[in-house]
Amino acid sequence: MTLLAPWALWFLAIAGAVVALYLLKIKRRQATVPALDFWLALAGRTRVHSLFERLKRLLSMLLWLMIVVGLALALGNPIVSLGRVKPRAIAIVFDNSASMQTIEGNASVGSDAPRQTSAQNPFTRFALARKAVDDLTLHRPVTDQWLLIEAAREPRVLAPWTYDTRSVRAAAASIQPFGGSAELQPAIELAKQLLAGKPDPCIVVISDGAAGALQPLASADPTIIPWPIGAATDNLGIARLAVRADRQHGNYRALLSVVNASDQKIDSQVTLRINGSASSVELLSVEPRATWEKTITIEPTGDIARNGGVLHALIDRPDALPLDNEAFAILQPIRPAVVWLVSSPETAFFFEQALGAMDPLVSPEDSLTMSLDQYEALAAATAGASGQAPITPPDLVIFNNCSPPSLPAARHVIYLNAWPEQLQAPAAGSLEAPQLFLAPRPHALTDHVTLQGARLTKARKVTLAESGGARVLAQTAAGDPLIVLFEHPDRQSLCFAFDILDSDLPFRNAFPLMLRNAVAFMHEDAPPYLPPEVRIGETVRPARPLPLGATTAQLAVLRDGATREAPTPVSDRSFTFTDTASAGAIRLIAGEETSFAAISLADGAESRIAPIVLPPDQDPAVRLSLSRGLLAFGGVPWVTLVLLVTALVVLEWLTFHFRWTE
Amino acid sequence: MARRASSGGEPLFGPDFLTILERLDLIARQVLHGRRQALRPSSRKGSSVEFKDFREYSPGDDPRTIDWMVYGRLGELYVRLFRQEEELDLWVLLDRSASMNFGEPGTSKFDHARRIAAALTYIGMANMDSASLIPFDTETRPGLQRMRGKGQIFRVMSTLESLEPASRTDFVRAVQMFTSGAAARRPGMVVVLSDFYGLQAARTALDRLRFFKHQIHVIQLVCPWELDPPLRGELRLVDTESGAHQDLTITDSLLRRYKTAFEAFSADLRRYAMTHSVGFDRATTQTSFDEFVRGLLQRAGPGGLLA
């Protein structure tokens, strides 16, 4: 017998007090009588010194001692082994990933079951896994040691080593479903570390197989005993929904990936909604255990390009895992770039035309052409206005055949036939009629650009410092750099070592393409406050500090066609938001900026819900020697003790009653 | 649990006490049919106006009692005998031992006995030749002797109020002291108020009173605690008089035996009284003293106080 709470043995000290009280004789109550002799003549047989009375007192004392010992043992929560099965150290790895929310049996197509939360629905694999914990802990000998690990994104010990199976079951009951993928391997590794030195160790992984991740782990280690959960396979889920803003074309590209986890071909459709309004319907036909993917171009309508929006993809088909039947993605705002062209009026025409043809990539309303003097005056005015400038600050400044005495404030600059000394790549002489070749390594700036055969009259000979952060995009046949991109943490500078107009590039498509690439590449917005993608169950924090002075984050959850305001307190320009248990979108209004985050499962591994199938000889009940016999009763001897103590109390009361009523 | 009555609490004699006494006196007069209590005939022969018998003259007889008419007819000297008239005294013996101090405060046996003693003394003073109040414990204590007239009642009340329960009792010795007095040797009515614990000693004392031809009436004071003691469990019983103690386990069975034995004790006392022409009454503290005294006066036949 082992006591789970040995501290309860301190209560045995009460037994000493009982004995002391009986030995020292409990102080009797005193009663005054008119004539004591009268009583003594009557009560000769009831004196305490009679042997019979002493025996009765001894019986009472023994009963009270047994009551005290019984209570102390019951409080100690003893466990008793019948010795049939050797004790083991068992670590339970509980898979609570998204696929464990699969609804098993007929309940998967029922009308009520999906409405319940995954933690409450008794037909989910999650609930079956909890029952498996109960089944396992109730039918092993009480001398086993138990450990419970939750295999969420990061493995977490929920119940440290204990003999108390009730605490293990209570810990299992407290596990909440996790909407992402379970990391079984780290959880198993953690279990192995904690099993070191334990007798007859084993790791019971209660899981549906984690899309096949469990099988190789169990095959490699015989101490791993998979406990398969579930049988359903019918699932068509969105494995991926991602959206990228195409600035060059002013639209969005959405990548939609759908997984068919079943053994049958499925024809279905995906409805795309933007800000709650139907945008398009994609018909799909997915082969068994295959993935369907498509890139969908979304042309923004209304204010979507300016304000952004929420894209909602929905598969309207009931299946075993409703969780992955919808996914969300964010359409970030597309803002045209503001370009300042600093050039003499005589040479600006060609570049003005090139930039003017870049709508909607370049904003014609806010872009300006100016001389160097005008630029310096405007730059000084813009900098001195401290954010209240009447003129929109430029995203990109192009210096044509000129450069300011100091580096401009703009983060993105193109120098045409200008080479500021601050770039640490001084010009040393000139190159006559150099040939222009693109560098072998491709770059976004040279996409679709062909410079082969371009004619240059002359160019600057530039020597690049080795640690200057420069990347050569085009060079001469001898390796002299002609187009160089300098990338520094706070600045990007694209330098042309020749005069564009002194070449035949104005007559080729190459330069306008390269200039368009440069505008698209070098134009960036400040990152939104919210991360665009959030996985179900993940905690949301701002991607960058909130504006100074903000005390409450004006958050709202867009889910099931409704918007629920969820103001969240701000601390140290940050917040923590945890209402991400199901798919939807989060909206944050900070200052004048609105940003969105999409909450989606979007995990192909979790959508592949087909469970692990074990051969009959790998039945965990057999490998774990589960018993349905008396061992189960051995787990609760404290109940027996309490019943015994109750019986003793009744017996003592009866003897007490007998003593006074004989 | 027994409670020893304290001398404090409600007054011993309330404001209407005298009114109650007057009412009881009226009842006593009705019982006596207007006769003076002091003119009771004596069984002893003596000198009075009521002729009783003749006997032969012997030297030393009062020559005034010689019946010369009989001498004239018979020629022999005979003296006339007359029923002697003697005074009837009431003696109230009040037990002031500690055992009498049982009961609720104000209604203890001692309080009850003092009220009864006051009432009987009042009636005696009003209707008899004299009334005396003698408290006793291990011996007789100074009391009030041979009082006449109702006006003495205030002395009686004052004396009773000043009485405190003593410790032990010795009824035999007290009676010895009582009868050693010349006045008490003359037969009278003796009322003993006590709980009579120690029955054997009580018998001895009563026999001594009977020896002096006293008309005896015993009143046993009983409180509810004695009839049904609220005792149970492991107790240390302490004698209220001696202070001796004994640990006992009071069970239901013992309590039943106690009640039976107490009734037997009381019955023994009653039996003694009946077989020795001694009046007997049991006064429980639950019954008011005037109701008890009224019953005592109105009861006819043997045992009645004025029978």
Image (tube, coloured by chain):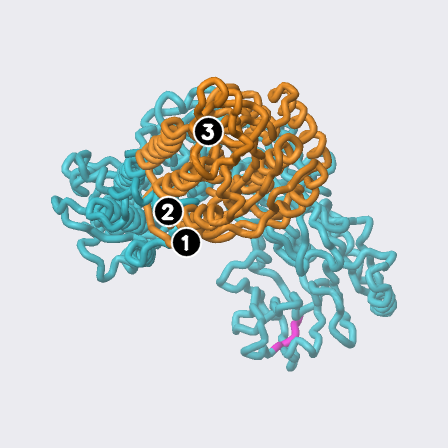
Chain colours: A cyan, B orange
Taking depth in this image into account, of B125 and B20 the one nearest to the observer is B125
Q: Which residues are magenta?
A: A457-462
How far apart marks 3 and 2 lie (CA) works out to: 28 Å
> Majority secondary structure of the magenta segment?
strand
Tell me, yes or no, whether the two marked residues, 1 and 2, touch with CB atoms within 8 Å: yes
**Residue under numbered circle 2:** A36
Say whether mark 3 and mark 1 are on the same chain: yes
How far apart marks 1 and 3 lie (CA) works out to: 30 Å
At horizontal 43% and vertical 48% (from top left) the residue drawn is B176
At horizontal 54% and vertical 47% (from top left) the residue drawn is B135
Identify the mark nearer the N-term, 1 or 3: 1
Where residue A260 appears, as percent x and y from the top left, is 39, 31
Q: Is residue B113 above or below residue A368?
A: above
Left or right? Give the position of A543 relative to A415: left
How far apart marks 1 and 2 lie (CA) works out to: 9 Å
Label 1 secondary element: loop
Left or right? Give the position of A112 relative to B199: right
**Residue under numbered circle 1:** B242
The amino acid beneath tag 2 is Leu
The amino acid beneath tag 1 is Ser
Q: Is residue A10 magenta?
A: no
Where residue A415 appears, as percent x and y from the top left, is 70, 67
Identify the subunit bearing mark 1: B
**Residue under numbered circle 3:** B279
The amino acid beneath tag 3 is Gly
Which class describes the residues within 10 Å of circle 3: few (<14), some (14-19), or many (20+)?
many
At horizontal 59% and vertical 76% (from top left) the residue drawn is A468
